[in-house]
Amino acid sequence: MNNLLRKIMALAAPAAALLLAFAAAASAHVSVSPAQSAAGAWETYTLQVPSEKDAATVQVDLRIPEGAAFKQYEAAPGWEVTVEGNKVSWKTTGAGIQAGQFQRFYFTAQNPGTAGEIAWNAYQHYADGSAVEWSGEAGSETPHSITEIVQAAAGGDSHSGMAMEDHGSMNMGGQDSMSMDEHNAIMEDLDQSSGVSPLLYITLGISLLSFLLAAIALLRGRQ
């Protein structure tokens, strides 16, 4: 029985390693969340930037999708923000995002007034002069994030999330600010709803199925 268990564990190790590799690949890219928001809403978005190279990430450029309007950003220590047309740039004033680290940037944009999908193209610049363009379709090596814009329910609040003006942010519109408790609640919701790629679940299912079939084969052979 001990010999059988050792064989099963030997089969399980490669499957687990494969699962971890796919999970890392599925999550290690520049992303914008949430994945769904209401038409016309002022949404607080989260731009998450992992550094995948040995060199530090020193600048990130984000293109605001057509039909959406950039409104505010939350100041991030060590980063300068510039807005040029539909391009918003975060540029480090310090060491940047080191290998194995990630940084979150928060901003508010007003969604298009009609339902549909908007794509967030991003451009990640490294200290060694290289750059990665996150503008590919879903399933590509460098995909852009997609937010589905849906029609809000009748009488719903079109202000999904607002960064506070006195929290070091830049106000691009004349809307009222939220309370700190409301703002923190939005940030907590964003953390909890940060999407996990469907590829991770598919890979998990394949790995578990492969492991189960291998274990059944071993048990039948022993019998």
Image: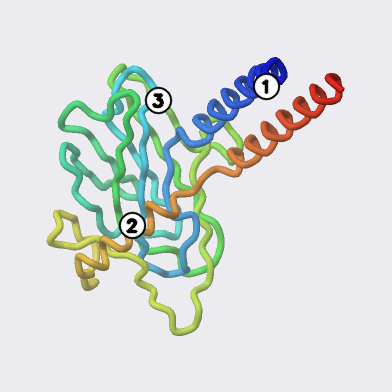
Instruction: Give how far across and how far down residue 116 sits, in percent.
Output: 56, 61
Image point (39%, 34%), residue name: 123
Residue beneath disc 1: 5
Reading the image, the residue beneath label 3 is: 52
Reading the chain from its start, which is encountered first: label 1 or label 2? 1
Q: The disc labelled 1 sits on which kind of residue?
A: Leu
State the separation of the CA atoms marked 3 and 1: 37 Å
From the top left corner, tell me how far across and down residue 77 is, in percent.
16, 41
Q: Nearer the viewer, residue 131 or 2?
A: 2
Q: Residue at x 22, y 73 (%)?
A: 176
Image quarter (top left, top right, bottom left or bottom right) of the N terminus: top right
If the image is split into quadrants, where does the C terminus sit?
A: top right
Residues at marks 3 and 2, CA–CA distance in whole angstroms: 25 Å
* As drawn, 19 above or below 171: above
What residue sits 23% from the left and 35% below the top? 91
Report the side of 156 relative to 146 (left or right).
Answer: left
Residue type (three-letter) at the residue carrying disc 3: Glu
